[in-house]
Image: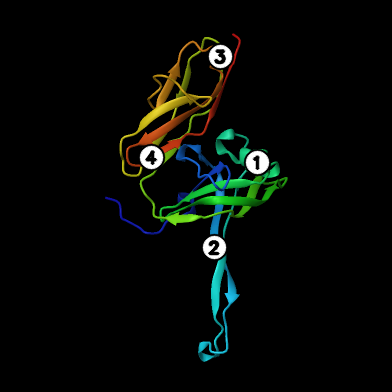
Amino acid sequence: MACESGAFTGRDVVVYYAIGCPEVQPAANQYRRLGMMRGKTTGVEWDTADATADQSAAYTQENLVTYKNVSFSGDGVTRKEDAYAQNALKRHVYNPPAATSSQPYVWFKIISPNDITEGPFLVTSWEDESPHDDVATWSLEASSAGLVDVRDVGEVITVTSQPVDKALTEGQTLTLTVAAAATDNSPLTYQWQKDGSDITGATSATYTKANVAEADEGSYACIVSSPTAGSVTSNPATVTVSAD
């Protein structure tokens, strides 16, 4: 039996994001993991109002808190693969769409072994650094855009192996695989989707489609569910099919 330790490292902290308005909390399966991260920092700072008056005790200044700002910042290694999801977030920050009122609103869910921080943020800064003799990196800063909740960690599902992109020729067999685990080891169920729609009968950790055709091209993902830990959606895998 392994010894128990209350300490944990930064790599145990996982960040998910979902693009959306502050008024509508995303469903669990709308979050995507922000991958290849190095640093993750959260904090809270209150504005205060001076409440000192002529009868304040012992000539001591008194203050009351008024409004708070919850901040999140992070950085990671730039990767071309869509699985790491930083490209979609970067494009949203550069050009926020009308769907989010032309504001770079993003929901973040930061899961650590200690607690979960979740809420809407306004991404106020994005930076790419590309030194000629080192790996390219990115960083962001964000401020709260509504209520940010901090709560105890419940049972969660972690996707430990994501489906990967496939480039096939007509007549080949498509095989996509996902691996996941729930913190309470509860049984998992699977539902594969193509372009956001359920694939009939695709309810195992591995999806196989023989004799693929051009119509099988698209974006595939798997919803992994547990009776106690809710559900998560894997990163999408892009499938392309070329003529034989």
Q: Are marks 4 and 3 in contact (CB under 8 Å)?
A: no
Determine crowd level at label 3: few under 14, some 14-19, many 20+ residues with C-alpha closer than 10 A: few
Determine crowd level at label 2: few under 14, some 14-19, many 20+ residues with C-alpha closer than 10 A: few
| Discs 4/3, front | 4
Q: Which residue is mark 3?
A: 215
117 relative position to 93: left or right: left
* Residue type of the residue flagged with mark 3: Ala
Label 3 and label 1: CA atoms lie apart by 29 Å
Q: Which residue is mark 2?
A: 44
Earlier in the chain: of badge 4 and badge 3, it is 3
Q: Are marks 2 and 4 in contact (CB under 8 Å)?
A: no
Quarter of the image with the C terminus is top right
x, y percentage for residue 29? 47, 37
Earlier in the chain: of badge 2 and badge 1, it is 2
Determine crowd level at label 4: few under 14, some 14-19, many 20+ residues with C-alpha closer than 10 A: some
Q: Which mark is residue 229?
A: none
x, y percentage for residue 82? 59, 34
Q: Secondary structure at mark 4?
A: strand
Q: Secondary structure at mark 1?
A: helix
Q: Quadrant of residue 84?
A: top right
Earlier in the chain: of badge 2 and badge 4, it is 2
Q: Secondary structure at mark 3?
A: helix
x, y percentage for residue 225? 38, 35
Label 4 and label 3: CA atoms lie apart by 32 Å
Residue at x 55%, y 57% (from the top left corner): 41
Q: Which residue is mark 4?
A: 230
* Residue type of the residue flagged with mark 4: Gly
Q: Secondary structure at mark 2?
A: strand
